[in-house]
Image (cartoon, rainbow, N blue to C red):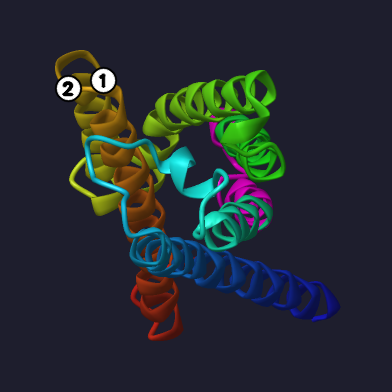
Amino acid sequence: MEFRIMAEMDIEKLRRSNRLTAYLGILIAIEFSVLWITAVIVNGNWQLGVNTLSELGGDVPSRWVFNIAVLIAGFAGIRFSFGLAKLLAAQRLGRTGSYVFAVASLGLISVGVFPIDTGTPHTVASIFFFTVAAIAAIILLYPFYKQFGVRSAPFITTAAVILVSFVSLVTTPLPFAEAVTVAGLLVWVAVLSLQILSDLRKANTGTAIS
């Protein structure tokens, strides 16, 4: 009886962790999208496909809006990554990919700490973030397949974001490819978070196990 109670407590603890992870993912997607648009409006001169996102954080009126957006997303991304690692704890690749994404989030924080007018530090931080985030997404493909299924939204979205980001990188100007990749990451984290919440709702009705 005592073992059963402890097991139920562990399950409930995991569900709370998964719920927090999902809410953080949704927060990241909404927060960055809203502040990105706000920064563009405040800037007044930024053009999609012409200017990089980082130019919103330089010595321009949108500086604080954009850099705060990056910092919030980075710190929330670290916590999101650790929650994802718990969700995928049964799979070594799942844990690995999650922790790699946490490292990518550290790179995102560095982008906010070292804005574009710092020169080389910003360039290194940006390349580090996008490279490590891509590695994390590739690693997580198989764990998502095992966890959610090949026809699931997380698996399909992850594969699509990887493909579209790569194609845009080799076929379009860098500023446009960067915007496409960032938008893809926001969609990815939102879709994954909604899937987690959906699975939790099913678990509460006894039709799935979280």
Q: Could you tell me which residue is drawn at 26 percent across and 39 percent down?
A: 180
Spot occupied by residue 152 in the image (x, y as percentages of width and height): 24, 50
Farthest bottom residue? 205
Spot occupied by residue 197 in the image (x, y as percentages of width and height): 42, 72
Q: Amino acid at mark 2?
A: Thr
Where is mark 1, residue-wise? 169
Taking the magenta stretch, the answer to whether it contains residue 182 is no
Which residues fall within the magenta stretch?
Answer: 76-94
Mark carried by residue 104: none
Q: Could you tell me which residue is drawn at 30 percent across and 23 percent down?
A: 174
Spot occupied by residue 171 in the image (x, y as percentages of width and height): 14, 17
Q: Quadrant of residue 114?
A: top right
Q: Main secondary structure of the magenta part?
A: helix
Instruction: Give above or below for 33 relative to 151.
Output: below
The kind of secondary structure element at disc 2 is: loop
Q: Nearer the viewer, residue 132 or 97?
A: 132
